[in-house]
Image: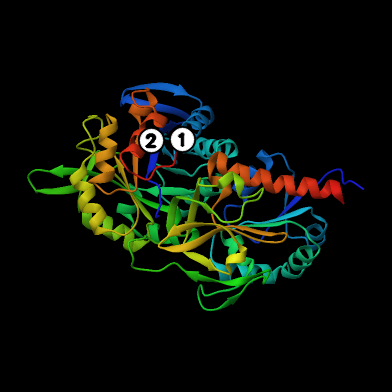
Amino acid sequence: MMALAKRIVPALDVKNGRVVKGINFLNLQDIGDPVDTAIAYQNAGADELVFLDISATLEGRKTMVEMIERVSSAVFIPLTAGGGVTDLASIRAIIQAGADKVFLNSAAVANPDIIRQGAEVFGSQAIVGAIDSKWDDKLKMNRVYVSGGTKATNLETISWAKKMVQYGAGELLVTSMNTDGTQNGYDVALYQALTQAVNVPVVASGGAGKKSDFVNVFKSGHVDAALAASVFHYGKIAIPDLKESLYHEGLVIRL
Amino acid sequence: MSKENPFIAVIDYGAGNIRNVMKAIKYVGLPAKLTKDPIEILSADGLVIPGVGAYKAAMDKINERQLLVPIQKAANNGTPILGVCLGMQLLFDSSTEFGETTGFGLIPGKVVTLPQNTKFKVPQMSWNQNNVAIENALTQGIKDEFTYFVHSYYVKTDAQYIAASVDYGVQVPSIVIKDNIIGAQFHPEKSGEIGLRVWQAFANMISDKAVNV
């Protein structure tokens, strides 16, 4: 029996080497030490962890590299990191610190060749194409946003996703800005289109509020992994309980 | 005669992921030394061949650093050897990755690409469930458990060497064993508690052996 597991991926926002969760952009609440948080998630059964660096300064980013080093000495599951990564040297620093994958977002829009460079040196499996996507009602298309979702581009999400894969991205992490923060479910239609268009794993992000949202995005969106933050961080959904439910829904889950 | 301080030599051939392997070995309590020194390789109580990267580039580097002969000698001396991911593939006769490349020749078999254009994405990059065929100290901890895989090539070898495997459209050997030579296609250093069991079992093999010399 084919048993490739669907992955449950908590996302941690990191600022100056500390884990934070943005309640909103102005009011950040520190929820703890990155190593302790990562160990807790590993023990809860997280299949992978994603670290998004929201530090605004170079100094802050250096701190994240040190944080990855500490986390990977105590936590033995795949780690993905990114946020503000613009060049090969930063990719190298993050991977050498112990991350398995680095995701590229705005920098890839500005210069897609960074994906190719990263894939050439570290392999496609280490380079994740990250996309912030929002439905544009006037243009009738899903539009790619950059700079933490603050700037619209003229790129259409599905074609940009395909392009990232052509350049060498080995996985896509796609956040729907329409559903992000709503806790009303993932943007299943977007992931249906994405998973039909590309042949690399797709990670869904944005909108998880209850266990059935995960069931839907796996069963109807056909994604390989589902990322969530708040529902895990604030204990609304417990990962062991979620995985048990998904397992009973007939999905392949690592229990 | 017992040996006081067993240590594992982690072969330094410039592969990625070496430091995560070092961290895992350290975590299970054995001293690990990253080395490209033939004398150290021959005096080590265990060898680990880490691996992320391409087969040919790895073999080129190993040949350039003249590490093949000391590794083969250590293998013949009965030193436990664990190859991880690409490091496991290197244990075999050859690979077809970028033309035909000769490997260590420690286990009979060939490394070939995963079938392309099937519903199974290449590389395989996720947690997959192990079917254990040969139960022993190394495999008992992974029986029916999921471990983390990242690879585009897999090993074709005789069933007698396949201690565990996963299904990915084809049967992918996940643990191979021939006497003191062991390979793990998955990343035990990235497979959570289950993966640490594999490192622990390997560490125990080395400690036991060191005590019984």
At x 72% / y 61%, what residue is drawn? B179
Q: Nearer the viewer, residue A159 or A2?
A: A2
Q: Amino acid at mark 2?
A: Lys
Q: Amino acid at mark 1?
A: Gly
At x 61% / y 46%, what residue is drawn? B140
Residue A226, percent from left and from top: 33, 41
In the displayed structure, B165 sits above or below A212; it is below
In the displayed structure, A207 sits above or below B30; it is above
- Distance, label 2 to label 1, CA atoms, is 8 Å
Contact, mark 2 vs mark 1 (Cβ under 8 Å) = yes
In the displayed structure, A250 sits above or below B55; it is above
Q: Residues within 10 Å of mark 2 (few under 14, many from 20)?
A: many
Horizontally, residue B70 falls left or right of residue A40, namely right
On residue A243, the disc is 2
On residue B182, the disc is none
> On the image, numbered disc 1 is attached to which residue?
A45
Residue B38 appears anywhere in the view: yes
At x 40% / y 31%, what residue is drawn? A239
Residue A6, percent from left and from top: 37, 45
Q: Chain for mark 1?
A: A
Residue A15, percent from left and from top: 44, 31
At x 68% / y 46%, what residue is drawn? B201
